[in-house]
Image (cartoon, helix red, strand yellow):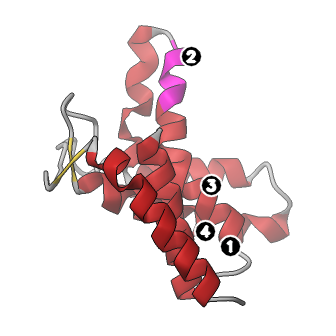
Amino acid sequence: MPDGATHFLVQIIFNKITGVKRLIPYTLFGTIAPDLFKGLHRLLPPNYSWALYPTHSPIYMLLLFYALALLFHEIERKPLIFGSMIGMLVHLFLDLLQINMGGGYYMPFFPLSFYSFSFNIIKTETSLFFLPITALITLIIIKLKKD
């Protein structure tokens, strides 16, 4: 959970710095969507859970966001897909920096490659240590960058 909270806070900082307004709900959804959809594998029988492994792939998530957008009114489809992809890419960038103890299923090049990839710079539990610092930085940026 601290990892998800850190992703969420970094997305808020990104939104404030870039000045995205209409896309904010979608970028915030996109930043937690890979882990949210990956967690759905628990609802599937074990022999089908592999279908949700590549949730950290931009192409896979683009198709998933497109399918999800079909449930929305036509005027909201493009912002949902675009905003969710921005959030997903921020999430992917942060996750690729991590060292995964369990190996993880970060396949950013899926379906072109099934290769799992990570930069292995930051330990996973480091997000717990940096959570208060990230929250403080987020609050400062929100105060300084009033709309």
Q: Earlier in the sequence, mark 1 or mark 4?
A: 1
Q: Residue at x 74, y 64 (%)?
A: 77
Residue labelled with disc 4: 83
Secondary structure type for disc 3:
helix
Marks 1 & 4, CB-CB < 8 Å contact: yes
Amino acid of disc 2: Leu
**Magenta region: which residues?**
39-44
Residue labelled with disc 1: 23
Residue labelled with disc 2: 43
Question: Which mark identifies residue 29?
Answer: 3
Amino acid of disc 4: Gly
Question: Residue 82 in the image: x percent, y percent?
Answer: 59, 70
For marks 3 and 1, give the CA distance: 10 Å
Question: Residue 121 in the image: x percent, y percent?
Answer: 14, 56
For marks 2 and 4, give the CA distance: 27 Å
Secondary structure type for disc 2:
helix
Q: Is residue 109 visible?
A: no
Marks 3 & 4, CB-CB < 8 Å contact: yes
Q: Earlier in the sequence, mark 1 or mark 2?
A: 1
Question: Residue 22 in the image: x percent, y percent?
Answer: 74, 77
Q: Residue at x 44, y 43 (%)?
A: 2
Secondary structure type for disc 4:
helix
